[in-house]
Image: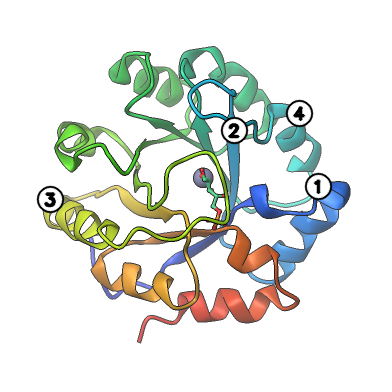
Amino acid sequence: MKHNKSVTPKIAPSLLAADFSRFGEEVDRVVAAGADLLHFDVMDGDFVPNFGLSPLMIDAVRSKTEVPFDVHIMVTHPLRYIDALVDAGSDMITFHIESDDEPYAIISVIKAHNLKVGIAFSPKTSCDEIIPFLSDIDLVLPMSVEPGFGGQSFLPDTFEKIERIHQEIKDMDVPPEISVDGGVTPEIGPVAARHGATILVAGTAIFRCEHPDVVIEKLRTIE
Ligand code: DX5
Ligand code: ZN
């Protein structure tokens, strides 16, 4: 299917914003609210100055749902984590182009496990860095905040990056998904989708509210 801007985006709640004291119930809450994917942020305290979720936590909730697990790894050495993330039940793994391992080596290891593979890039990295990989990956993720922390404000120049990537992939037979992550709200998400984003990741907006189903529905409504 060609890449089409009018497609309803998939919504991926980011578990980094969940109440960790009741992690499993938080998974149930957003699955019941209509999540299309669940987004897990894995960090190593080195690539970014913070820690996030771990393969143990992903594994702990894997049996709760069939909803695909979208795992975003903010780590210096992605190759060291892939086996554990596969065993934990990941469906797709997105690594950063700024990490230290060789991108094609990471892509081939993830694909060898029959998982989908994505590449994320941080706000200061040019789109040009990821263009050569677009025909080899399933997802591209222009970060709309500095990676590492939830609750930051969306950087508006991300819209141009989404548009640029959309132009690059729109005629491919099997184009990658364009995801966007960081500061996505019910106001911003539909605008990102109109620029070509097909997956909207949202942490604070979905978890820090009483009615995640309402927020998810607003995020999805692009007209
Ligand atoms: C940031 C993470 C995001 C984060 C988004 O490094 O990759 O997934 O959880 O959180 P919000 O939606 O609160 O910006
Ligand atoms: Zn993320």
| Image-based side of 6 in relation to 38, left or right | left
Q: Residue at x 26, y 64 (%)?
A: 196
Q: Which element is circle 4 on?
A: helix
Residue 43, percent across and down?
A: 58, 29
- Residue furthest out toward the right: 21
Residue 25, percent across and down?
A: 84, 57
Neighbourhood count class around disc 1 (C-alpha, 10 Å): few under 14, some 14–19, many 20 upward: few
**Mark 4 vs mark 2: which is more N-terminal?**
2
**Mark 1 vs mark 4: which is more N-terminal?**
1
Q: Which element is circle 1 on?
A: helix
- Residue behind mark 4: 56
Q: Residue at x 51, y 29 (%)?
A: 48
Q: Which element is circle 2 on?
A: strand
Neighbourhood count class around disc 3 (C-alpha, 10 Å): few under 14, some 14–19, many 20 upward: some
Label number found at residue 20: 1
**Mark 3 vs mark 4: which is more N-terminal?**
4
Gap in angstroms between the C-alphas marked 2 and 3:
29 Å
Gap in angstroms between the C-alphas marked 2 and 1:
14 Å
- Residue behind mark 2: 42
Amino acid carrying mark 4 in the image = Leu
Gap in angstroms between the C-alphas marked 1 and 4:
13 Å
Amino acid carrying mark 2 in the image = Val
